[in-house]
Amino acid sequence: MGKVLIFSAPSGSGKSTLINYLLTLGLPLGFSISATSRAPRGKEQDGVEYYFLSDADFRAKIANNEFVEYEEVYGGSLYGTLRSEVQRIWDEGKTIVFDVDVVGGLNIKKIFGSDALSIFIQPPSVAALRQRLEGRGTDSPEKIEQRLQKAAHELTFASQFDKQVINDNLQQAQHDVEVIVRNFLAE
C-alpha cells in the first residue's frame, strides 16, 4: 500500500486550484479521478474531471464492491473512489491525490490511516465563498445557496483533518500546501 493525500474543502474554497498547482511541481503524485452519477457540467470530460456513470452502473459497481468509498450528495448524485483508480496510481509508483468532499475525506483517512495525510482547505469567510461561487457562473442561485449551507456544515469538520490551510492569499496557500506535501512525501 502506498501513501495518499486527501484534500477536502467546501465548494469554492480553491481546493482544485491548489491541487492543480501541486500537480505542476514534478512531484510523484497521481490525481485520483472520482466517479459520479451526475451529468457533466460545462466542459467536463469523462475520464478527465470524473468518470461519469449512469446511476444504474454506479449502483452495480457498489454491489460488486468496486469502490474504496462512496456517498450520495446533493440530493441523489453519487460520488466515489474506484478501487481500480487507486491501484492504477500506485502501480505508477505515485502518491494518490484525492479531491473529495469532507465526508469522503474523513472516510478515506479512516481507511488508509497513517499512510494518509488529510488537508482541509478553508475559505477566508462564507462571504468570500459566496463571491467565488457567484463568480464561477456555473450554478443557479438556488444551487449556490445549497452549496453555502453545506459549506457552513463542512467547516465544522476542519479540526478533524491533519492540516488546515486558509486560502485567503493564493500564493501563500500554494506555499503552505507545497511545504506540507513535501514534508509528508519525505517521511
Image (cartoon, rainbow, N blue to C red):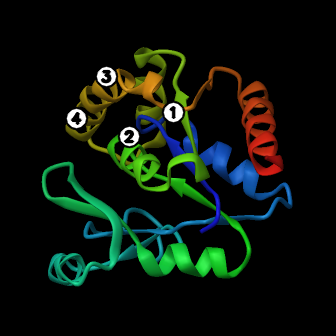
Pick the quarter of the image with the N terminus.
bottom right
- For badge 3, the amino acid type reads Ala
Instruction: Give how far apart the Cα atoms at labels 3 and 2 are.
Output: 12 Å
Q: Nearer the viewer, mark 2 or mark 1?
A: 2
Q: Earlier in the sequence, mark 1 or mark 4?
A: 1
- For badge 4, the amino acid type reads Gln
> Label 2 near label 4: C-beta < 8 Å?
no
> How would you rate the neighbour count of disc 4 (Cα within 10 Å): few for under 14, some for 14-19, many for 20 or more?
few
Dot 3 falls on a residue whose secondary structure is helix
Residue that badge 4 annotates: 146
Instruction: Give how far apart the Cα atoms at labels 1 and 4 are.
Output: 15 Å
Residue that badge 2 annotates: 102
List x then y, in percent, for residue 149. 24, 27
> How would you rate the neighbour count of disc 1 (Cα within 10 Å): few for under 14, some for 14-19, many for 20 or more?
many
Instruction: Give how far apart the Cα atoms at labels 4 and 3 are.
Output: 10 Å
Q: Earlier in the sequence, mark 3 or mark 2?
A: 2
Dot 2 falls on a residue whose secondary structure is helix
- Residue 152's mark? 3
Residue that badge 1 annotates: 13
List x then y, in percent, for residue 31. 61, 64
Dot 1 falls on a residue whose secondary structure is loop
Q: Is residue 114 above or below residue 90?
A: above
Residue occupying image coordinates x 48% and y 19%: 128
Dot 4 falls on a residue whose secondary structure is helix
List x then y, in percent, for residue 107. 36, 49
Q: Earlier in the sequence, mark 4 or mark 2?
A: 2
